[in-house]
Image (cartoon, rainbow, N blue to C red):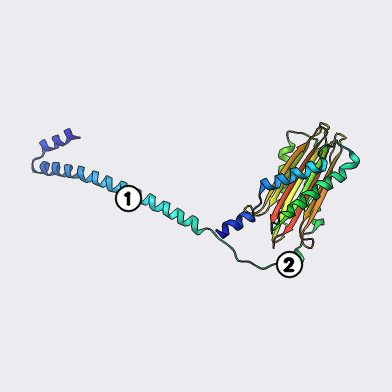
């Protein structure tokens, strides 16, 4: 760079002197500009951090009470419809399948998600839904499955279906609880 | 400070519930071997004990307790559950217990009112 400047100085006369001075001043000004640029970048980063803190504080939302104690008349949880949903899911996904310890863990997860999503689609407002599926290999062992709940008897209910495969049983349950 | 305290009280505390379940199971079927004619009573006892202790916590929660008791026979058992709830306040807890002749799996789901 310095050699190039000396060349320029040799070629030109007045303009070279000026250009030398300019390059020197440019050098100084470029360093100053670089410093200023870095300073501006730092300020922007700091201000961005500040903005992020503010936005995280601002997105904390609380809702007012709706004071709704009961579901609307037509939209209480219907056990029969939920039973039909569970039966449909079982028949569609378990027909003709044998017990396989490699496939069944994933299959059972997808079954529970399906049952939960289909019951949600029934259009129930303000209901919390829990779907469980239990699969037991049939080897003539004894088994007992029971559940009990503490809830509001008027609006909360459950549905439970047992499905028999060639060498296994599947029991699916859905619990729906009204959120007031 | 008030908000923080109320959040602690109304969140589902897994450790507390785990202890309750373990005590209930130990109390109901602790040293017994699998007996088919008693299993019905055992599951009812486990579930009732769990629910009673949970209500004594005095938290504004609805509870669902499920219990599976299975004889040890080399058979496979899979359970899965999928829930649609409020993640910040609701929770679930599952405890697996076994002895020489049987398995016992208890799940508790707690949903805030």
Mark 2 lies on a secondary structure that is loop
Chain that bears disc 1: A
> Upstream in the sequence, badge 2 or badge 1?
1
Chain that bears disc 2: A
Residue A3, can we see it? yes
Mark 1 lies on a secondary structure that is helix
Which residue is farthest right?
A: B37
Give the number of the disc on residue A132.
Answer: none
Q: Position of A40 compared to A143: left or right?
A: left
Residue at screen point 63% across, 66% down: A65
Q: Which residue is mark 2?
A: A72
Using the rendered image, report if marks 2 and 1 lie on a common chain. yes
Q: Quadrant of residue A170?
A: top right
Q: Percent x, y for residue A87?
A: 81, 49
Q: Position of B12 compared to A46: left or right?
A: right
Q: Position of B12 compared to B106: left or right?
A: left
Residue at screen point 70% across, 52% down: B110
Q: Quadrant of residue B97?
A: top right
Give the number of the disc on residue A40.
Answer: 1
Answer above or below: position of A105 versus B10.
above
């Amino acid at each position: 760079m310095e050699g190039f400047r000396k060349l320029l100085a040799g070629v030109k006369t007045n303009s070279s002197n000026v250009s030398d001075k300019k390059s020197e001043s440019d050098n100084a000004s470029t360093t100053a500009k670089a410093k200023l640029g870095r300073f501006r970048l730092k300020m922007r980063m700091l201000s961005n951090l500040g903005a992020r803190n503010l936005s995280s504080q601002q997105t904390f939302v609380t809702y007012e009470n709706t004071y709704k104690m009961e579901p609307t008349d037509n939209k209480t949880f219907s056990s029969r419809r939920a039973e039909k949903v569970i039966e449909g899911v079982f028949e569609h996904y378990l027909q003709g399948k044998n017990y396989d310890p490699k496939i069944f863990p994933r299959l059972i997860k997808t079954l529970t998600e399906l049952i939960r999503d289909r019951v949600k689609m029934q259009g129930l407002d303000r209901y919390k839904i829990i779907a469980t599926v239990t699969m037991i290999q049939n080897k003539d062992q004894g088994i007992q499955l029971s559940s009990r709940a503490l809830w509001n008897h008027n609006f909360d209910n459950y549905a439970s279906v047992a499905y028999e495969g060639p060498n296994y049983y599947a029991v699916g349950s859905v619990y729906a609880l009204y959120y007031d | 400070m008030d908000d923080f305290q109320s959040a602690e009280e109304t969140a589902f505390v897994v450790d507390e519930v785990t202890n309750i379940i373990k005590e209930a199971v130990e109390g109901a079927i602790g040293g017994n071997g699998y007996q088919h004619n008693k299993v019905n009573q055992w599951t009812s006892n486990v579930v009732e004990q769990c629910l009673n202790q949970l209500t004594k916590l005095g938290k504004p929660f609805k509870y669902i307790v499920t219990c599976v008791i299975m004889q040890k026979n080399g058979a496979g058992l899979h359970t899965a559950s999928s829930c649609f709830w409020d993640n910040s306040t609701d929770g679930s807890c599952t405890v697996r217990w076994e002895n020489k002749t049987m398995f016992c799996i208890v799940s508790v789901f707690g949903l805030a009112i």
